[in-house]
């Protein structure tokens, strides 16, 4: 695809994404050593100073050495090449090769980014935030839900928008996940009604096999929060048994995505936790093969660049329109 407008939209979108919060690591991973991560093609180093997360551009201004190769000493980050010390605000506090009373150049600073910890994750925003970190549903704090057993994370060689759109797509279930999420003998999708919500949109469906009892249909509520978050809430008739899945897709680059999956349920399934996790890993591996092979890698924001079907592709069309609007927001 070579339409200039689509290319321009992606350049604008990549710019806009710097104004949003993205998860880059689990909080428990950041303790006594600096950690190297990547976000939107930017190398970052995460570390703790007095219990708080600090995030720098992962290069020492002196000779371009990754600061993540260094270590922590007295609440400061020490560069591995020449021993320059940096405090959490980015200021260089010591240059060992200079006399102790020698002034430190004002330019001797690390580039600092905003960071917050929420939901057990470290979130980073590379520019002035346009919105707050997405809000998890209220059941995330409901003691009747088991969340600990079903958390997972992984990395795909695919664009974050492609990964997100796949999570919100219903019509691929019978073909990519036959017998698990869909039935090839019943491939038709019911009509969905798109409803706006704060930060995105949602729609309800009973497509797919019931996670509770296969002889009944389950309802599902899909909520897409821009740019790269999908929540899927399911319940059986009567709403006694409920489950919620939260997917966060972090854009390492335009062709790499780190995902975090939270899943909780307020009941004991007939299958063991390990069997349920095996099922999830199988589903995600089936999806990964497809999504990593999609071309172009960057999802077309111009709706004329791919063929869309009214009904089955309604959620994808809404998502792409909103991504395009996000890209064009000043």
Image: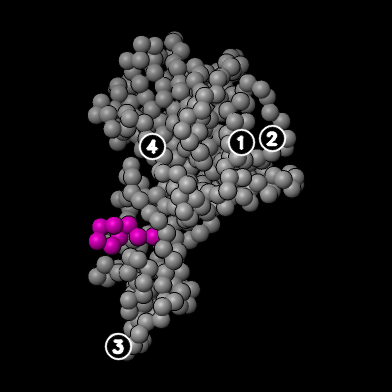
Location of mark 2 (residue): 303
What residue would you read off at disc 3?
101
Q: Is residue 135 above or below residue 78?
A: above
Q: Is residue 118 left or right of residue 279?
A: left
N-terminal of the two: label 1 or label 2? 2
Residue behind mark 1: 320
Q: Nearer the viewer, mark 3 or mark 2?
A: 3
Image x and y of residue 28, in percent = 30, 50
Stretch of the chain drawn in magenta: 48-56
Is 166 a magenta residue? no
Q: Secondary structure at mark 3?
A: loop
Cβ atoms under marks 2 and 4 closer than 8 Å: no
Which quadrant of the figure has residue 174?
A: top right
Q: How many numbered marks, from 0 up?
A: 4
Q: Earlier in the sequence, mark 1 or mark 4?
A: 4
Image check: 43 left or right of 1?
A: left
Magenta residues: mostly which secondary structure?
strand
Element at badge 4? loop
């Amino acid at each position: 695809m070579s339409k200039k407008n689509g290319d321009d939209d992606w350049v604008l979108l990549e710019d806009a994404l710097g104004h949003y919060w993205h998860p880059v690591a689990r909080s428990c991973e950041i303790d006594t050593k600096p950690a190297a991560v990547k976000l939107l093609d930017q190398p970052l180093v995460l570390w703790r100073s007095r219990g708080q997360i600090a995030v720098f551009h992962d290069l020492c201004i002196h000779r371009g050495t990754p600061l993540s190769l260094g270590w922590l000493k007295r609440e400061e980050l020490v560069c591995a090449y020449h021993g320059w010390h940096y405090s959490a605000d980015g200021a260089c506090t010591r240059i060992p090769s200079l006399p102790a009373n020698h002034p430190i150049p004002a330019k001797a600073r690390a580039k600092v980014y905003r960071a917050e910890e929420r939901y057990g994750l470290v979130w980073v925003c590379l520019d002035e935030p346009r919105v707050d970190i997405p809000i998890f549903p209220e059941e995330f704090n409901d003691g009747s839900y088991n969340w600990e057993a079903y958390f997972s994370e992984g990395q795909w060689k695919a664009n974050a928008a492609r990964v997100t759109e796949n999570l919100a797509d219903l019509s691929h279930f019978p073909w990519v996940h036959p017998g698990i999420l869909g039935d090839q003998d019943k491939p038709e999708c019911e009509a969905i009604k798109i409803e706006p919500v704060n930060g995105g949109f949602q729609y309800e469906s009973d497509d797919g096999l019931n996670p509770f009892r296969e002889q009944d249909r389950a309802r599902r509520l899909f909520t897409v929060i821009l740019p790269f978050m999908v929540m899927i809430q399911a319940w059986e008739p009567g709403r006694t048994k409920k489950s919620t899945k939260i997917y966060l897709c972090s854009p390492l680059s335009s062709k790499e995505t780190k995902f975090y999956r939270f899943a909780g349920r307020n009941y004991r399934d007939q299958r063991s936790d390990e069997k349920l996790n095996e099922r999830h890993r199988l589903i995600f591996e089936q999806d990964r093969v497809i999504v990593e092979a999609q071309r172009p890698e960057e999802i077309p924001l111009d709706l004329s660049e791919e063929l869309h079907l009214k009904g089955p592709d309604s959620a994808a069309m809404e998502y792409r329109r909103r991504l395009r609007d996000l890209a064009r927001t000043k």
